[in-house]
Image (tube, rainbow, N blue to C red):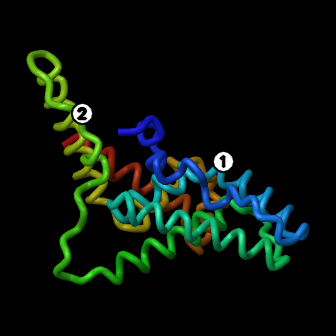
Amino acid sequence: MSDNQSRGGPPSAVWGVTAFDMRSSRSKALGPARRRVTAIFAALHRPVYRYVLGILGCEWEAEEVMQEAFLALYREYRSGRHVDDPKPWVFRVAHNLAIDRKRRRSPTEPEPDEWWEQHEPAEDSGAALQERIQREEQREHVRRALRALAPRQRECLELRAEGLTYRQIALTLGIAVSSVQNHLARGIQRIREELEK
């Protein structure tokens, strides 16, 4: 696993040169859009990647969706349109692209392994092995709790975990702020109940 992956980002082999490290000098008008998107990309690519990876469960698909979302933002700025708050805008585009991609999967196509299982450490022995078994049991307990949530509750919790405000979550998911508050409160309560079992 690369150092970048250990921080929750996409594999560094893919991101040694980003899609937004564009050095062509086609037009001076593209400069400000390129700079804006590069700065936004630097701040948001890891959280967007993690969020999409949680939806899709597949690293390469998450990378593609993340790239598509930032390219859409670049096209938006390049065309002269203004994005008031780019954080929820990018998350919303990435969310919609991930949901579309997930819907297109064939019903017989197996779901990818849980993304957190793709980065398991090497097998240890003795006390380290016992600790790993306990961590896996805890993870399974949390997975069950998350699976017990309604999809919208899970989405709100994941976006909140990525640092989005209630208003940004509402913009990302296209729902009212009061709905975000309700989904989060109910989701947290449901997780508590599940973890106390």
SS type, badge 2: loop
Q: Position of residue 33 (x, y in %)?
A: 81, 65
- Asked whether the viewer can see residue 28, the reply is yes
Q: Position of residue 117 (x, y in %)?
A: 24, 47
Callout 1, which amino acid?
Answer: Ala
The mark found on residue 43 in the picture is 1
Q: Is residue 36 above or below residue 124?
A: below
Q: Is residue 92 left or right of residue 38?
A: left
**Residue 56 shown left or right of residue 32 in the figure:** left
Q: Which residue is mark 2?
A: 121
Looking at the rendered structure, the secondary structure element under dot 1 is: helix
Judged from this view, the residue extending furthest toward the top is 127
Provide residue 2's location: percent of width, then percent of height: 41, 38
Residue at 17% in and 20% down: 128
Distance from the alpha carbon under mark 1 to that under mark 2: 28 Å
Viewer-closest of 32 and 129: 32
Three-letter amino acid code of the residue under disc 2: Pro
